[in-house]
Amino acid sequence: MKRFFVLLTVWCLCASMSAQEYNQIPAAWKWLDNGEVAFSYDGSFVDKRAFSVSVKGFSRKEGIRAPQRFTTFPVHPEGAVNLTYSPDSTALAFTRGGDLYVVDIASGKETRLTSDGSDLILNGYASWVYYEEIFGRPSRYRAFWWSPDSKKIGFYRFDNSLVPMFPIYSPKGQDGTLQQTRYPKCGEPNPWVRIGIIDLSDPDKIVWADFDEKEDQYFGTPFWGSDSQGFFVSREPRTQNTLDLYRVDAATGGKEHIYHETYPTWLDWIEGMFFGEKGLYMVRRFETGWDQLYYLSYDGKTLRRLTDGKNWRMSIVQVDERAGDVFFVAERDSRVRKGLYRVDRKGVITALTPSELHVDRVRFSPDGKHYVVSLSAFDTPTQVWLNESRPSGRKTRAYKVADLAGPDFDKSQVRLPRLVWMKTRDGLDLPAFIVYPDGFDPSKKYPVHMDIYGGPDHPVVTERWYSPRIFDWWAQHGIIEVYADCRAAGHNGREGLDQIYRRLDEVEVQDFVQWAEYFKALPYVDGEKIGVEGFSFGGTMTALLVMDHSDAFHYGIAGGGVYDWALYDTHYTERFMDTPQNNPDGYARTRAVSHAKNYPVTYGAQPVGTEPVMLKITHGTGDDNVHYQNTLQLVDELQRHGRKFELMVYPDGMHGYGGYQGAHFQAANREFWLKYLKRQ
């Protein structure tokens, strides 16, 4: 479940918002060398307004052209999938029909590297659960990796023989079609994985890493050592509470264990590493309850923690080993804003950006002496700055490259979110933000619409700039708009997150109920008209809230939700719930389908449109992530108990609706909210 939350945010704006003019700001930037950085308004770096800025004197050059090095491929093998350049740009690797190939660009000669590919055996092409949950959708199923010297390729071989097939029916055409995916649901067999390395000087020989493919396990995204002799592979057992990192010898397949980590609940994969001369830098959260930076030598003999304190959502952006500095972004001085920091070899941490502004994006020059950063806040439109990473004189030089705020910007005339905090009954602090309607009068009563997600470590509350257009419709129709988080969002570090282990949805639902109580206590809130809306994990939350707590949330729209965790994939769900075999009671308690009997609305009780409670459910029938099966089972159970609800199905719709379906989704939902929150 890759972090889906419906939020139409456009931060690169040039049009009028709330009767104010805004500047356009660059959509992308990249360093051309240590002394010059290019900016583009459409990301192509060949647009008419593209420009660059020199770090010397911050002089600006207009009309530059700095296209990507490769915008197309010089050869196009038939049926090739995931064409990927070698680091020296002399060859391309790709997959076709379950096998891995390489093609020499100069001669066009293809070499087939594997030969057993089939519908069940995939070489260099990920099985679905790895694509969705481990490599991520941006991988486009690619499961092969060039060595830095361009002489070797490491790859994963997936055997789907025991993975159950899930069918997805499309109604299009006269007879319809059936898409079949090897999709392992909770407790079912995962694909077997072998890890192979091929030296292109001997392409007929595959060196297999010394792992037992039949063990119940997962492998993370691997990486090559700088010498191209070692292939680093992380491994977790199916329970995902232990992580081990191995160096696999590219010549023999023998593995050397270099790192071990364990935690009582679950562990995430090592991601966003920075590779130094003798070791790597990584972010882990197993020791202090918060994110910390660590240095791990490649031989595994040295592990050193570099930071302390309450850091969260930490990521490494630059390392200067000569100076002993590591630059990172994290929520450190705020639980809802990220800042840019530097930690030196003595462990002293220095903030490089103002604590009242949130760091959206940052990119360092190759030598690490300068960086470009975008900053914003609820009341500060996005700014783009070019800064020194260390002072070259008495103070650090900085240059404002662009500012979204126009010359007439007046924050008192803009619909701005207001941050609020709630302390839970057990002492955790949770954030939300409120946007008030136009002409707000605190002596009147207003309905509330609350947007939620609720999934582990994925907040909806960040104190950054939001386009006021997002809130226009709510404000214009007299509805208070709220975005709220629960403890699973991560604002309290592992203390909050760990409480959801083996009991997804339980404590999170209680947090949202307490949010409803918080707003009901405000004198200007109509406590009988509080609505909630969420998609994906947020859809699950919404359905449970309206079915089990209709006294708190009277109306809700649940989209694309998981209504029985046994119906979702192994890797995501079992990370937080363990397996159904090990935790049958947890799966039974959190099965939203079984809560349908608690939903109070039946036919004939009230005239249409005046119901004091109403749940609307939406789903795309083509959703390959959260299957439409979830909604069908919930609908069946609601019907079994004679319950009245609304349903909107999007034929062939995916996990999120686009095009005409997206437009329909928005229009239909707005009508729903007007009917039930405004009685219009």
Image (cartoon, grey):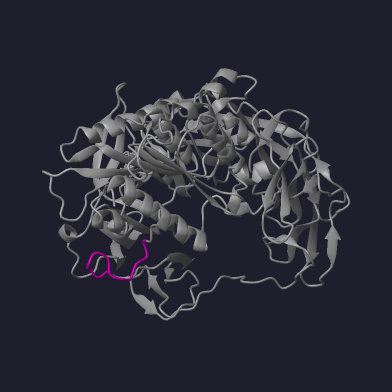
Q: In this rendering, does residue 309 appear at all?
A: no
For the point 58% across and 39% down, the residue is 632
Q: What is the magenta range?
A: 11-22
Rendered view: 367 above or below 612? below
Q: Residue at x 31, y 51 (%)?
A: 674
Q: Identify the residue at horizontal 79%, vertical 38% (top origin).
A: 253
Whole-percent x, y for residue 54 in the image = 38, 71
| Magenta-span inclusion, residue 623 | no
- Side of 108 relative to 482 (left or right): right
Outermost residue toward the left? 443
User: In the displayed structure, does residue 237 sit left or right of residue 155?
Assistant: left
Picture quadrant of residue 399? bottom left
Q: Is residue 663 left or right of residue 198?
A: left
> Looking at the picture, does residue 576 appear above or below residue 415?
above
Classified by dominant secondary structure, the portion drawn in magenta counts as loop
Measured as percent of width and height from the top left, residue 380 is found at: 25, 57
Question: In the depicted view, which residue is nearer to us: 660 or 534?
Answer: 660
Q: From the viewer's side, name the closer residue of 163 and 363.
A: 163
**Which is nearer the eye, 629 or 311?**
629
Q: From this viewpoint, is residue 192 visible?
A: yes
Q: Position of residue 206 (x, y in %)?
A: 84, 46
Q: Residue 550: x percent and y percent?
A: 36, 31
Quadrant position of the N terminus in the picture: top right
Query: Is residue 213 toward the left or the right of residue 226 in the image?
Result: right
The residue that appears at 34% across and 35% down in the rendered structure is 553
Question: Which of 364/396 is in front?
Answer: 364
